[in-house]
Image (cartoon, helix red, strand yellow):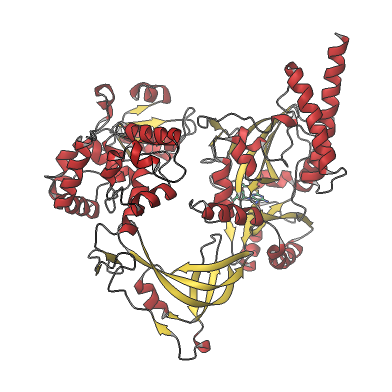
Amino acid sequence: MEKLDKVKREIEDLKGRIQRHDYLYYVLSNPEISDKEYDDLMRVLKDLEDKFPQFITSDSPTQRISGQVSEGFKTVAHRVAMLSLDNTYSIEEVRLWENKIKRMLAKGVILDYVVEPKIDGVSCSLTYEKGVLTLGSTRGDGRLGEDVTASIKTIRSVPLRLLGKELPAALEVRGEVYMSKKDFQSLNDQRLKNKEAVFANPRNAASGSLKLLESKVVAERRLKCFIHSFGYIEKAFFIAQKEFLDKCSAWGLRVNPYSKYCQNLDEVIKYCVSFQEKRESLDYEVDGMVIKVNSFKLQEQLGSTLKSPRWACAYKFPAHQATTKILDVQMSVGRTGVITPVAILKPVECGGVTISRSTLHNFEEIERLDIKKGDAVLIERAGEVIPKIVKVIVSKRNGKEKTIKIPARCPVCAGKVSKIKEEDVAYACINPLCPAQLKKSLLHFASRGALDIEGMGDSLVEELVERKLVKDSADIYYLNEEDLLGLPLFKEKKVRNLLSAIENSKKKGLARFLYGLGIRYVGEKAARILSSRFNVIDNFFSLKTCDLENISEIGPVIARSLVEYFRQPQVKKLIQKFKKAGFNPKEQISPSKGVLKGKKFLFTGELESFSRLKAQELVLSQAGDVSSSVSKNIDFVVVGKNPGSKFAKAKKLGLKVIDEAEFKKLIKR
Ligand code: IVH
């Protein structure tokens, strides 16, 4: 017994020491011990915990990576809604904001502020109960978020246990999870090497990483976090934002070091303006400053609108700009054959990111901006890594610039290029067998929202097309072991997994299949609606646009595109080929679920078990329809907590109103 007590004490002591060193390293950036000494401490703790697993607690530093793969994220309701901020874009607008809030407060009240960098990441909410981190969630729609605790725990600057003795029984703080510019660049470099899609900006990279299901992979993304506000606290520990931030630091939470207390608005403005230069030297993206009224009492008096608090506003920085030169213009061929001109730029740094290409969108844009090869141009980058060309610097022309011509032949297959009828700015390669189109359409066919064939990524598709093993999407279903074993890095197990993923995809239903075909304008939602209306693929061959006229969400553009697509003889052949391989896509609704067919739903208020989006998706997946505005033809109004004005309108119209429990019964959940 005594020995066990001793072990327990030793474990507690090690955890405390490691926690302190984590704080010194990740929060204060001021370590006291070497990496080796730190690793030694961790190893001793890990060995002890392996021997005495009864003493492992959720806040142990060894538990940062759960090692488990989550199946999905649970939805969690935020105790206090997570709002967003109103933006201002100039000093005048900031002054107007102050005038407005002053009018709402007692005459003569003196306002002081805290100004903080607006970190361009993803917001998160962290709940600590008795000082221990128990929940980490995303903002979601502001009322319902996703439980991403496993991912949050991998962030080393997020303490698993708060420091100090005087802790609130329950505390929910909010902050920004972000990826540093450096980590973002190396992640994208690595993804490029692996022929994976790159992230458009550090924000997307952070958000995508937080939602990975494998915490081991999340940990590799080296996310970071700053705490900037709070949602809920059991007992008021502070009366102003400045005090709150100081308290956070004392509890071991990481607070941005550039947060500044300002006595008046002039100081605020001075700081915001001066920070614009500072921003370039930071290792993370800052897209503006957040100005907050310091006093919580005044914050409370000012309150919030439905969307944002009145006591704060964001001062957004102008986009990053730089000048460079267009070295060349390449033509990129998309999945549907559309040719997009892309400017290859002399690499230039713009807001901490090296820019070397920019899409020119289409040939009309080239004409509009009068862009020529060799031109000096001003580029701008707002949030996204992909910049846009703002203008040509005409004064720098030397006469050697070359006009950009619309290619007569496809740069990939040398097929004919023609203008697309309904979009007169676009030109496309019309050869349906063009390899560039084929690769992109195969990737789309196998993508998550479509047939979801795991393992069918960029490099495999590249090999299959280059070796002419696959000439259209139906060929995927004719691949055999022998074909695949001949590919580089394909061993038996990988081949077996891929073949079974291909086989399984045959059960995925008509909606995904229709979406996967990549018919112009037919997105996931349209595909679901069409599938539930027409049930089997053969019904599409005889379709006329008038058959599609009265289906909500299917407008004339989709209708025309669909009819034209199925009218092509090669499409008929393609579908035959799928069928011959045993893939005959059908609508996937069991008769019991068909009850929602044709029924229109409207949602108002918060549901407890699902986010609004999820609930809408469930309706659509069962052949129902959803609407966002009240009208007479709505069959069910689903009312959650705190419903909006739609509820009153619905009652006035005498529509059928149901609650969440009844909704669940309807959808058989
Ligand atoms: S305070 C009611 N402080 O900006 C919102 N937000 O556009 C109070 N953000 O979703 C948030 N840095 O995630 C606050 N220093 C900061 C921030 C910050 C970034 C994000 C936040 C919010 C978004 C609003």
Q: Nearer the viewer, residue 371 or 609?
A: 371
Horizontal arrangement in the rendering, residue 167 relative to residue 590 (left or right): right
Horizontal arrangement in the rendering, residue 111 relative to residue 182 (left or right): right
**Relative to residue 267, is residue 599 depicted above or below?**
above
Q: Nearer the viewer, residue 505 or 632?
A: 505
Residue 563 appears at what percent x and percent y?
17, 51
Horizontal arrangement in the rendering, residue 480 relative to residue 640 (left or right): left
Horizontal arrangement in the rendering, residue 279 relative to residue 261 (left or right): left
Residue 242 appears at what percent x and percent y?
78, 48
Residue 173: quadrant of the picture: top right
- Name the residue rendered at 27%, 74% in the picture: 408
Would residue 250 be visible to someone looking at this image? no
Residue 155 appears at what percent x and percent y?
68, 40
Residue 402: quadrant of the picture: bottom left
Judged from this view, the residue extending furthest toward the bottom is: 399
Q: Quadrant of the C terminus?
A: top left
Would residue 65 be visible to someone looking at this image? yes
Residue 557 appears at what percent x and percent y?
24, 55
Q: Quadrant of the N terminus?
A: top right
Judged from this view, the residue extending furthest toward the top is: 1
Residue 593: quadrant of the picture: top left
- Name the residue rendered at 86%, 20% in the picture: 9
Q: Nearer the viewer, residue 581 or 208?
A: 581
**Relative to residue 619, is residue 195 depicted above or below?**
below
